Each structure stands twice: as C-alpha cells, then as structure tokens.
Image (cartoon, rainbow, N blue to C red):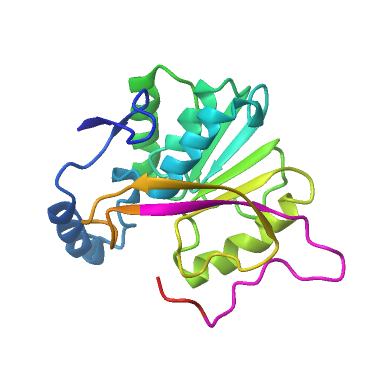
Amino acid sequence: MLSASVLQPGLLLHLATELTPLWLATESFLEQHDMAPPFWAFAWPGGEALAHYIAAHPELVRGKSVLDFAAGGGIAALACARAGASSVEAAEIDPLAVVAMRLNARANHLAIQPYLGDIVGAECRWDVILCGDVCYEAQMTRHILPWLARCATHIPVIIADPGRRYAPREGFERIAEIEVPTSLELEDSASRRVSLLRLLAPKPTHSPPSVDGPWPRD
C-alpha cells in the first residue's frame, strides 16, 4: 500500500499494512528459502528521523553525492533527492528492497540509484553517508562500523540510532534527537527517540568505535 511518511507526509512509500501477519508469514517462508526479512516493507524510526532531519537541514546534502547505506525502502535516499543532492546511491543486500526503492522513487518522481550488494569496504566516493537503524545485530555492526569510521575520516557519516543494543558507545557526536511515532507491532513502545550520531574520525592511536559488550537492554 502507498502510504505517507509519518514525519514527512510529502514522501510516499510502498509499505505493508498488516504488519504482524506479514512478518509471521515471511519468517516461515524465509526459513524455507534462505531469504532476508522484509525490512524494506516498513518505515523504521531511523529512516524516518533521517528524512526529517534532511528536510530541516537540506544544506547537509544539497549539491552533494550521498550514500544511503542499508537503505531499506529508501526513505532517507528519497529525502536527499528531494533536498537537492547531486546524486543519491542507496545500497542494499536484498533484491526485493531494491525493487521497493525503485517503486518508491517512481511514486515520488525522484531519482535515486539503487545498489545491490555489500558495499562495505568500497572506496569512499561520496560526500555524505547516512545510515538508518543499522546497529541491531552484533555481527552486522562489527562488519560495518570499522568501514564507516574510516569513511568518517573524510566525510560526514551519520547513524540514526533508535536505542538499538549494538549502537556505538563512543567515537561520535550526537547532533540531534528526534521523537518518531512507531507501531507497537514493530517496536516495544508507541514512539522511539532517535539519536543522530555523527561518527568522529578515529585518532591514529585509537580503534574504531567499540561494538563490544556488555550492552544495555533495549
């Protein structure tokens, strides 16, 4: 179903309407077919917060090349395109997410460039990297954070964290906090306070931001 972003009603997204039945059905299907969960079918708080922040601060991306990393349905990428970014690449490892991004771009009459595959480790060829809600698993966070920290040596890298267990505990500057309404079918509360964390360039004598435990409970 084509729905409006909760914080940016001018952005339209193809989203699931009955969340719990879809998630339960897909869990069984995915186990049988070794496929990724349909994260692209929901507007997660991190993406919503990034879209909202970009709309309020278009100068962050205007005239610049942007990477929306782990883009899901592409809400942050679409906000960047609408704010006047010169180019917007949206990276995802799920081919269905790439299809969703293309549909969402068409619905909003905006141009983005979906990228299918693991882009971690690529040369930093962008002016800005945005990451919405990417620190929800330890293995994934350990995979992506050192690369993002290296990119932060050259460009702004912003992670939108709605309080996930594996978000970095150091090596960042908190630039904003945004309250995002959510669904109780997806989250444990009716809203999430999302922190926008700009990664700091690692000092030569320090490691990238730590992702080791122990971790606070969500």
The answer to whether residue 193 shows anywhere in this view is yes
Residue extending farthest to the bottom is 214
Q: Residue at x 78, y 61 (%)?
A: 202
The answer to whether residue 115 shows anywhere in this view is no
- On whether residue 196 falls in the magenta region, the answer is yes
**Quadrant position of residue 64:** top right
Q: Residue at x 63, y 29 (%)?
A: 61
Count of marks placed on residues: 0
- On whether residue 130 falls in the magenta region, the answer is no
Q: Quadrant of the N terminus?
A: top left
Q: x, y percentage for residue 207?
A: 76, 70
Up the image or down, 99 lies above or below 205; here it is above
Q: x, y percentage for residue 15?
A: 25, 38
Q: Quadrant of the C terminus?
A: bottom left
Q: Which residues are magenta?
A: 192-214
Secondary structure, magenta segment, majority class = loop
Task: Determine whether, in the image, residue 65 is placed left or right of residue 194.
Answer: right
Q: x, y percentage for residue 197?
A: 60, 53
**Residue closer to the observer: 110 or 119:** 110
Up the image or down, 200 lies above or below 28; here it is above
**Residue closer to the observer: 186 or 193:** 193
Q: Residue at x 22, y 62 (%)?
A: 27
Task: Determine whether, in the image, residue 149 is placed left or right of residue 70.
Answer: right
**Quadrant position of residue 106:** top left
Q: Residue at x 45, y 50 (%)?
A: 93
Q: x, y percentage for residue 182?
A: 30, 49
Up the image or down, 4 lies above or below 136; here it is above
Residue extending farthest to the top is 109
Up the image or down, 159 lies above or below 53; here it is below
